[in-house]
């Protein structure tokens, strides 16, 4: 049995020596193939990173200057263009009110009447005083005429004649004063009637019959029907580009409907603690009513910025970049985007200038320094 084991071992050694060269040659061939494959991969990568000598077809666009305009909206409420708070110039009790809320009135119509127990007696007294002075003046004229005849006969001194003439002048002056007092009392009596200063409608009744009205206290508020306006408050730096008569956009706050109006007044100062200035816009849109919420659009001053197509901007490890055309090759340039406006990009001032050409089609096949062919 030991003999068989020795024989088998000798047979194995002989077989191993026979196959050993073949195994060594196979391993050597395998190492050569792996090395060749690595060299081919490195060469392919280097070829991919190096600029291509073949032209890549692309489309380019020029860098343009674009005004970036932003419209700011300011809220306001529509109101009548002509409006008034009606008040009495004298005090008294509201005797009667002749107009109701919403009633249409014409210029000169009586809308309320005031009762003051002093007005009529004062006017009567002034009238009586005027009539008395006029009668005294007639008597003084007759006396002066008689004294003049006596003086011509040398029966009267000149001093007595001048005294009568002075008396007549004093009476005439008193008549003028009495006439002015009567006119004042008559006007005050007329002020007891509150009249409409223009055609319009009654908006509000602030005092009812029987209530006491102080002089100057609003009693009735009315507004005209021939036009509306809206007042908004805006920062002063926005007013520099606005002029009277300029058309501005407006929006209805509830429905979103857009229409236009014209600037009628521009504030040049602001009182109180507010840093905003008044801006009044006249409304011409039919169908609007007083008290509707509106928004007035005011444009900011335009600034010129660089603009390129949105498709020209790509993201890289360094940030946002574009391919800038230089002769017949492209160069990767970093850019900073300030704003996206539709299909255009607003850039900050930097590595690009006006009329530079950037690639916006075919950028996925490009590398820095590649040669390109421009397509129409």
Image (cartoon, rainbow, N blue to C red):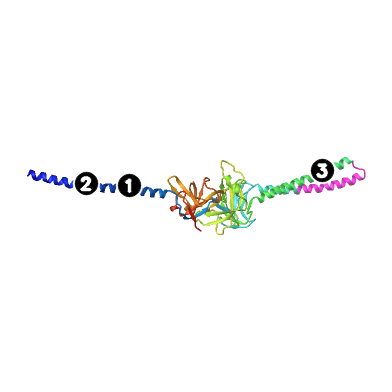
Start and end of the magenta stretch?
A: 131-157
Residue 141 position in % (x across, y down): 83, 47
Single out the mark in the foreground, 1 or 2: 2
Reading the image, the residue beneath label 2 is 20
Q: Quadrant of the N terminus?
A: top left
Element under label 2?
helix
Single out the mark in the foreground, 3 or 1: 1
Q: Are marks 2 and 3 in contact (CB under 8 Å)?
A: no
Element under label 3?
helix
In this rendering, position of residue 355 left or right of residue 46: right
268 inside magenta stretch: no
In this rendering, position of residue 319 left or right of residue 180: left
Q: CA distance from mark 1 to mark 2?
A: 23 Å
Instruction: Identify the residue at horizontal 87%, vertical 43% (top origin).
Output: 161
Q: CA distance from mark 3 to mark 1?
A: 143 Å
Reading the image, the residue beneath label 3 is 167
Single out the mark in the foreground, 2 or 3: 2
Residue sticking out furthest to the left: 1
48 or 277, which lies in front?
48
* Comes first in the chain, label 2 or label 3: 2
Residue 208 position in % (x across, y down): 56, 51
Query: Does the rendering let one see residue 72?
Result: no
Which SS does the magenta portion mostly show?
helix
Reading the image, the residue beneath label 1 is 35
């Amino acid at each position: 049995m030991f003999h068989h084991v020795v024989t088998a071992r000798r047979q194995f050694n002989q077989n191993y020596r026979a196959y050993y060269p073949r195994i060594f040659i196979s391993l050597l061939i395998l190492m050569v193939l792996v090395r060749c494959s690595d060299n081919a991969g490195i060469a392919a990568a280097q070829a991919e990173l190096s600029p291509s000598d073949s032209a890549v077809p692309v489309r380019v666009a020029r860098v343009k200057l674009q005004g970036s305009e932003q419209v700011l909206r300011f809220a306001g409420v529509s109101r009548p263009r002509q409006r008034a708070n009606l008040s009495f110039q004298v005090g008294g009790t509201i005797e009667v009110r002749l107009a109701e809320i919403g009633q249409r009135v014409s210029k000169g119509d009586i809308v309320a009447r005031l009762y003051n127990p002093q007005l009529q007696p004062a006017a009567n007294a002034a009238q009586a005083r005027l009539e008395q002075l006029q009668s005294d003046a007639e008597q003084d004229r007759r006396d002066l005429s008689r004294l003049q005849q006596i003086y011509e006969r040398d029966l009267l001194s000149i001093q007595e004649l001048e005294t009568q003439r002075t008396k007549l002048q004093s009476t005439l002056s008193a008549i003028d004063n009495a006439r002015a007092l009567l006119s004042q009392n008559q006007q005050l009596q007329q002020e007891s009637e509150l009249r409409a200063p223009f055609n319009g409608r009654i908006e509000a009744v602030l005092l009812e019959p029987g209530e006491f009205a102080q002089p100057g206290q609003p009693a009735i508020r009315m507004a005209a029907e021939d036009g509306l306006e809206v007042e908004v408050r805006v920062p002063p730096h926005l007013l520099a580009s606005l002029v009277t008569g300029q058309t501005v956009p407006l929006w209805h706050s509830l429905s979103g409907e857009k229409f236009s109006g014209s600037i009628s007044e521009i504030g040049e100062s602001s009182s109180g603690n507010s840093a905003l200035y008044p801006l009044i816009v006249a409304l011409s849109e039919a169908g609007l009513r007083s008290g509707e919420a509106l928004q007035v659009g005011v444009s900011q001053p335009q600034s010129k910025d660089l603009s390129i197509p949105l498709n020209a901007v790509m993201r890289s490890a360094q940030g946002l970049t574009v391919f800038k055309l230089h002769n017949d090759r492209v160069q990767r340039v970093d850019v900073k985007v300030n704003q996206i406006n539709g299909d255009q990009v607003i850039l900050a001032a930097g590595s690009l200038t006006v009329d530079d050409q950037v690639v916006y089609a075919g950028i996925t096949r490009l590398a820095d320094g590649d040669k390109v062919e421009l397509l129409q």
